[in-house]
Image (cartoon, helix red, strand yellow):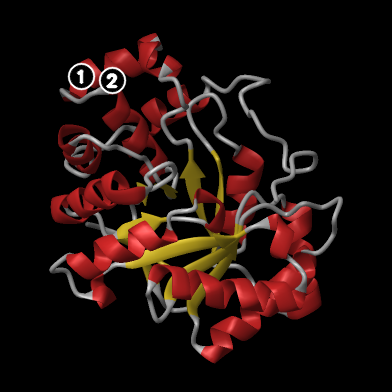
Amino acid sequence: MQYFNLNDGNRIPKLGFGTYKLNGSTGVAAIQSALLNGYRLLDSAVNYENEGAVGKAIRDSSIPRDQIFVTSKLPGRHQTYKEAINQIQESLYSSGLEYFDLYLIHWPNPKEDHYLEAWQAMIDAQKFGLIRSIGVSNFEPEYTDRLIKETGVTPAINPIELHPYCSNKKNREYDDSHNIITEAWSPLQRGGEAFKEEVIKKFAQKYDKSPAQIILRWETQLNVIPIPKATSYAHQLSNLDIFNFKLTEDEVKQIINLDKPDGRKFDPHEHEEF
């Protein structure tokens, strides 16, 4: 596994494992399989209702805790300061872990306008030792600017919707300029429509890789961390096998050119989750 250095001195794997909808014993089994196959970044959230499954998979694995990077996310319904502090503690109790490597504000929910409170709570939780790194998720530049201006603390990470139909250039460039690592959720564009693009298929044939591997490699070359989910053993291994080839700069641009005006499904200015 290769790693990115974060702006707070910690480091994070360049490829993660998404756990959305991996719940109960089948979820534990899929997460354990991912750990055995070499994944070291597990991405969870309060709203995924599987922090317990993630913690169980970690405890039952033979991998030392300090070698696993665990992320969870604060839901919109708990963004006031006191509720955020309580929820971070509850997340740890649910997972059975002593700390999270990364905790994120799941969505900014700007109409509610509590994300600044949530950010201050996370800054304090980091000081308490509950969280190693803190970040945001689905944040537009103006929201992140406000956090930095009001608190002086820059997020380490910002996961955003990013795939071949939505390369999210504005957010990527903003994050890069502020030394914030961008993550990609829905990195393979749910539904797999992008797999059928001629340019993707051409590169897959050239490099003897699958369309999914081409897309994941493209994202890592954008200095983005993709977080794919895969329940099958074969797909888990395949998604990891992307660091033994490299797309040319022109090929990276060709995939960026697949952007569609309506490629982004969720607008953080409007979409809210609680």
Q: Quadrant of the N terminus?
A: bottom left
Q: Position of residue 223 (x, y in %)?
A: 43, 50
Q: Which mark is residue 206?
A: 1
97 sits to left or right of 139: left
69 sits to left or right of 155: left
Residue at 79% across, 55% down? 142
- Identify the element where label 2 is drawn: helix
Residue at 31% across, 62% down? 3
Residue 12 in view (yes/no): no
Q: Position of residue 48 (x, y in %)?
A: 50, 50
Q: Are marks 2 and 1 in contact (CB under 8 Å)?
A: yes
Residue 167 or 173: which is nearer the viewer? Answer: 167
Residue 149 in view (yes/no): yes
Residue type at tag 1:
Lys
Is residue 74 placed above or below 215 in the rendered structure? Answer: below
Dot 2, how many residues are within 10 Å of its Cα: few (below 14), some (14-19), or many (20+)?
A: some
Q: What residue would you read off at disc 2?
A: 203
Is residue 190 placed above or below 170 in the rendered structure? Answer: above
Q: Position of residue 44 (x, y in %)?
A: 45, 55
Is residue 200 placed above or below 98 in the rendered structure? Answer: above
- Identify the element where label 1 is drawn: helix
Residue 93 or 74: which is nearer the viewer? Answer: 93
Q: Quadrant of residue 269?
A: top right
